[in-house]
Amino acid sequence: MWEIQKMPDDDLLKPGQKAPDSGQYEIVGPRGGDAGGKERTVVQGEPLPPTPKPGQKYRIVDKTQTSGRSPKRK
């Protein structure tokens, strides 16, 4: 028999919450399932944008690997 395992809600973020890390955030459905594979790029500390449908949330899928500091210009 198949068991459906729900992902913990701990790693889901609501639109408007500040992004804890820079990177790619996947939009997930109200119950944590796939919402079409759409992603948004968000910078650490910036609010997550509105989702296409009510009740959807975000999950980080790919953190940015840089230190977040730009090289100095000459």
Image (cartoon, rainbow, N blue to C red):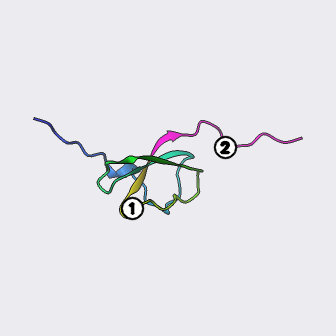
Q: Is residue 44 left or right of residue 69?
A: left
Query: In front here: 72 or 49?
Result: 49
Q: Going 40% across and 56% down the picture, which residue do you hit?
A: 57
Quadrant location of the N terminus? top left
Query: In the image, what residue type sits under mark 2?
Result: Gly
Q: Main secondary structure of the magenta part?
A: loop
Magenta residue check for 61: yes
Q: Going 43% across and 55% down the picture, which residue do you hit?
A: 13
Callout 1: 10 Å neighbours few (<14), some, many (20+)? Answer: few
Q: Residue furthest right?
A: 74
Give the numbered dot on residue 68.
2
Q: Is residue 38 left or right of residue 55?
A: right
Query: In the image, what residue type sits under mark 1?
Result: Lys
Q: Which span of residues is magenta-colored?
A: 60-74
- For disc 1, the marked residue is 53
Q: Position of residue 74 (x, y in %)?
A: 90, 41
Give the numbered dot on residue 70.
none
Disc 2/disc 1 C-alpha distance (Å)? 31 Å
Asked which quadrant contains residue 2, the reply is top left
**Mark whose residue sits in front, 2 or 1:** 1
Q: Position of residue 44 (x, y in %)?
A: 58, 51
Q: Mark 2 and mark 1 in contact? Answer it, CB < 8 Å.
A: no
Q: Position of residue 31 (x, y in %)?
A: 29, 54
Q: Say above or below: 30 vs 68.
A: below
Q: Is residue 68 left or right of residue 37?
A: right
Magenta residue check for 62: yes
Query: In front here: 55 or 38?
Result: 38
Task: Identify the element where label 1 is drawn.
Answer: loop
Q: Say above or below: 28 vs 47.
A: above
Asked which quadrant contains residue 73, the reply is top right
Q: Going 16% across and 39% down the picture, which residue do you hit?
A: 3
